[in-house]
């Protein structure tokens, strides 16, 4: 079977050839770039890439480098230290605006040049070369291949870096830049000059979608740092049209002046587009349109409430014993549904079976609330019989059949519930996934 995703992307490219806007003009490499290039790619969290259009065309990453450098600076120094230098507020200004907080002197966010330059200055490394190499190999790990700097673009960027150099000196004068301003601008323009294809960008986006895990499965960015970076991308990633982008497309994204655009669907994958003509905000015209079309077709928007709780609990009575069968992935909202079903058990009426054999994943909060609700069923006088072959509620239990949870699990309380299926005679859970047919267990 041929997976139809590539075909879909090809149709998307074919249907969005029409263009407007202008390529960036401030360096010859952009002014002379072929403006008709168009490419799109989608990468899954495990690194499979589907793409269409000019997928082999390399272009400099430009501002799309900013979230990744930001992640590395936080990895190097911790969030608190980085926040002392750069804030996380949308500025509503153009990318090269000298927008600093009038009180603290901090750049408004790391996605505009002032913030990105301050962030670059934070990178750990013995010297300029060491920092450059660290950054390049960090990007490369996320892209799943060795990336290279476009030396011509870098030379041009440097020769036009007057404004960025001014920003760096100003940051230095306010105590918001670590390192030498000229060195930092050298490194910052170099990070902007790293060559990528849409495939690389999609894979980098997919790594962010996977909580910071690279295509090869290694955890490159701590999940907490990753979430923070995605949050800043969501509010500040699209220059001074970040608000419009978030309302229309609704996913964390970052664009760059060479025409690249990267979007992240948390938990689902990464999308990248490339088309050099830009709108008045500096975002790729066709890149935006392609994301908007994909949103119409696929429903990307994170604010769509598609994840409403499903019915996860079925109560039935087997041989006079109530059985609660729970199915699927449990978050807090699903457990709330389960508890509503437990609520219907009148106190002190004998055994209750709770069958979790069809539960796959349980969020930590769901696990804790579930344990607490089982404890309450037990306090109501029920003999709670828990079927949990995959130990989704935890692995710590004693040989006597109790679940013994660590102190952190339920705030110091150790539930004394049963776990093991000790008899195979009844039929209370005859259709459970394990094939075990009974849940007659004694409480200690
Ligand atoms: N190298 C560019 C600059 O800092 C990056 C701009 C961008 O992509 O927004 O001027």
Image: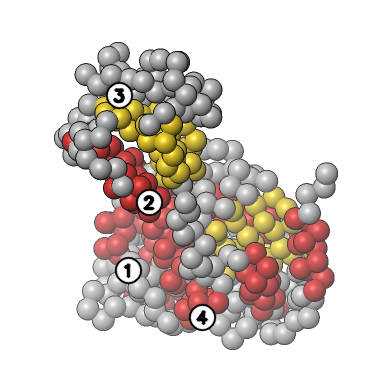
State the mark number for residue 244. 4
Binning the other alpha carbons within 10 Å of mark 3 as few (below 14), some (14 to 19) or many (20 upward) gives many
Horizontal and vertical percent for residue 260? Answer: 64, 67
For mark 4, give the secondary structure: helix
For mark 2, give the secondary structure: helix
Residue on which the image places disc 3: 418
Binning the other alpha carbons within 10 Å of mark 4 as few (below 14), some (14 to 19) or many (20 upward) gives few
Cβ of mark 2 under 8 A from ligand 1? no
Q: In terms of sequence position, does the residue under pointer 2 or pointer 3 come before the other?
A: 2
Disc nearest the viewer among 3 and 1? 3
State the mark number for residue 87. 1
Horizontal and vertical percent for residue 412? Answer: 16, 35
Q: Are marks 4 and 3 in contact (CB under 8 Å)?
A: no
Q: In terms of sequence position, does the residue under pointer 4 or pointer 3 come before the other?
A: 4
Q: Is residue 128 above or below residue 423?
A: below
Q: In terms of sequence position, does the residue under pointer 2 or pointer 1 come before the other?
A: 1
Q: Are marks 3 and 1 in contact (CB under 8 Å)?
A: no
Please name the residue shown 37% across and 31% down the image: 321
Picture mark count: 4
């Amino acid at each position: 079977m041929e997976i139809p995703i590539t075909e879909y992307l090809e149709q998307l490219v074919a249907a969005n050839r029409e263009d407007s806007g202008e390529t960036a003009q401030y360096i010859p490499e952009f002014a002379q770039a072929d403006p008709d290039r168009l490419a799109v790619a989608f990468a899954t969290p495990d690194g499979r890439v589907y793409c269409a259009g000019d997928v082999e065309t390399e272009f400099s990453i430009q501002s799309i480098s900013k979230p990744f450098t930001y992640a590395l600076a936080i990895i190097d120094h911790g969030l608190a230290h980085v926040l002392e230098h750069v804030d996380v507020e949308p500025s509503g200004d153009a990318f090269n605006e000298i927008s600093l907080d009038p009180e603290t002197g901090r750049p408004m966010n790391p996605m505009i040049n002032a913030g990105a330059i301050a962030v670059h200055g934070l990178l750990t490394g013995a010297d300029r070369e060491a920092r450059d190499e660290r950054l390049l190999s960090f990007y490369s790990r996320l892209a799943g291949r060795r990336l290279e700097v476009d030396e011509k673009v870098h030379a041009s960027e440097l020769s036009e870096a007057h404004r960025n150099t001014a920003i760096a000196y100003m940051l230095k004068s306010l105590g918001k830049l670590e390192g030498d301003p000229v060195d930092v601008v050298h490194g910052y323009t170099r990070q902007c000059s790293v060559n990528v294809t849409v495939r690389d960008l999609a894979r980098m986006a997919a790594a962010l979608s996977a909580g910071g895990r690279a295509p090869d499965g290694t955890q490159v960015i701590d999940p907490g740092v990753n979430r923070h970076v995605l949050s800043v991308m969501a509010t500040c990633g699209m220059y001074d049209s970040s608000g419009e982008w978030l309302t229309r497309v609704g996913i964390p994204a970052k664009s760059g002046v060479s025409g690249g655009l990267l979007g992240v669907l948390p938990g689902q994958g990464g999308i990248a587009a490339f088309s050099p003509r830009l709108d008045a905000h500096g975002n790729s015209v066709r890149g935006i349109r392609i994301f908007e079309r994909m949103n119409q077709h696929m429903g990307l928007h994170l604010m769509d409430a598609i994840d409403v709780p499903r019915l996860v609990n079925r109560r039935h009575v087997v041989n006079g014993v109530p059985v609660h069968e729970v199915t699927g992935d449990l978050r807090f909202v699903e457990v709330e549904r389960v508890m509503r079903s437990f609520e219907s058990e009148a106190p002190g009426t004998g055994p209750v079976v709770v069958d979790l054999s069809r539960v796959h994943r349980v969020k930590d909060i769901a696990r804790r609330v579930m344990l607490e609700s089982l404890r309450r069923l037990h306090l109501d006088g029920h003999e709670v019989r828990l079927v949990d072959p995959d130990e989704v509620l935890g692995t710590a239990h004693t040989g006597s059949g109790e679940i013994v949870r660590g102190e952190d699990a339920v705030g110091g309380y150790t539930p004394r519930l049963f776990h093991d299926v000790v008899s195979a005679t009844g039929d209370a859970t005859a259709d459970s996934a394990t094939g075990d047919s009974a849940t007659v267990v004694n409480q200690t």
